[in-house]
Image (cartoon, grey):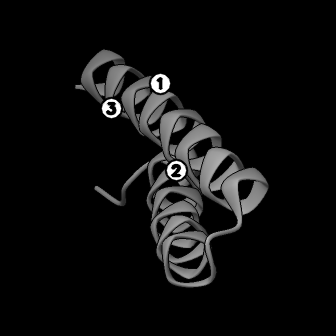
Amino acid sequence: MPMDKDRVKGAATRAGGKMKQAAGDMTGDTKMQTEGKLDQAKGKAQNAMGSAKDALKK
């Protein structure tokens, strides 16, 4: 059974958030750091929603 699309999107959003936060850390850009953290939280929630959908399918 393939993974739910929300899990895939969530993982991508979370990874992008980590990169954005790291870039903000390197440049001292607090706005970018905050955006990265928010993206990571959004990705984590999206992944959790996809996991719940997968569990319901079983």
Q: Which residue is mark 2?
A: 10
Name the side, left or right, on which 37 lies relative to 31: left
In the rendered image of this protein, does residue 35 appear above or below residue 8? above
Residue at the far front: name it. Answer: 28
Q: Quadrant of residue 9?
A: bottom right
Badge 1 amino acid: Met
Q: Where in the figure is residue 2, as x and y percent of width and height? A: 36, 60
In the rendered image of this protein, does residue 11 appear above or below residue 19? above
Q: Earlier in the sequence, mark 2 or mark 3?
A: 2
Residue at 68% of width from left, 54% of height from top? 30
Badge 2 amino acid: Gly
Q: Which residue is mark 3?
A: 51
Judge the density around disc 2: few (<14), some (14-19), many (≥20) Cα neighbours within 10 Å: many
Name the side, left or right, on which 6 lies relative to 1: right
Q: Which residue is mark 1?
A: 49
C-alpha span from label 1 to label 3: 5 Å
